Amino acid sequence: MTIDYSPKFKGELKKIQVFISKDNVQASKKFVKELKKQIESTPNMPYKYRPSYYHDDKNVRDMIYKGYTIIYKIYDEYIKIVEIFNQNLPTIKKNNL
């Protein structure tokens, strides 16, 4: 099973990295590295994280990491990392999955 990062996720992660780097560049690099490590372990147990609070699909999951919610969808052959956000203010639309 492979992992596919959506353009939206990549853009939001970059914004988060830039924001963190304003205080501490090393901390921003560490955040991204550890987050990607956690995401990369997802194919081993794709249903490990809770069913999404934001979607009514058992294949859509919410991974919580250091106060951020990472929404991903499990398909037969791959996992799509859809979005990352802080707080409970998602901008995701169901047709983006």
Image: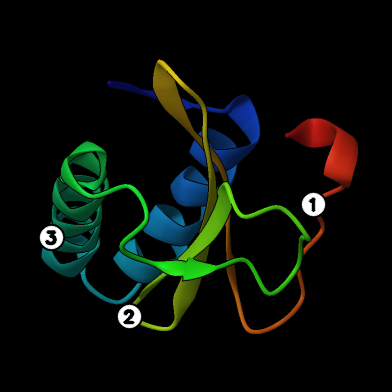
Residue placed at 16% from the left, 42% from the top? 44
Instruction: Judge by depth and name the residue closer to the eye, 59 or 95.
Output: 59
Q: Mark 2: which amino acid?
A: Lys
Q: Secondary structure at mark 2?
A: loop
Instruction: Give the mark, 1 or 3, whose residue is nearer the N terminus.
Output: 3
Q: Earlier in the sequence, mark 1 or mark 2?
A: 2
Return the x and y of residue 93 as percentages of the image width and height: 87, 47
Quarter-of-image position of residue 67: bottom left
* Residue identified by numbered label 3: 30
Instruction: Identify the amino acid type marked 1.
Output: Ile
CA–CA distance between discs 1 and 2?
20 Å
Q: Secondary structure at mark 3?
A: helix
- Mark 1 — residue? 92
Q: Is residue 80 left or right of residue 56?
A: left
Residue type marked 3 = Lys
- What is the x, y in percent for residue 95? 88, 34
Return the mark for residue 66.
2
CB-based contact (under 8 Å), mark 3 and mark 2: no
Q: Are marks 1 and 2 in contact (CB under 8 Å)?
A: no
In the rendered view, would you say 9 is above or below 18? above
Q: Earlier in the sequence, mark 3 or mark 2?
A: 3
State the image coordinates of residue 84 (x, y, percent, origin top left). 55, 57
Q: How many numbered badges does the structure rendering display?
A: 3
**Which element type, helix, strand or loop, lies under badge 1?**
loop
Q: Are marks 1 and 3 in contact (CB under 8 Å)?
A: no
Q: Is residue 50 above or below residue 33?
A: below
Q: CA distance from mark 3 to mark 2?
A: 12 Å
Splitting the image into 4 quarters, where does residue 52 fall?
bottom right
- Pointer 3 local density, CA inside 10 Å: few below 14, some 14–19, many at least 20: few
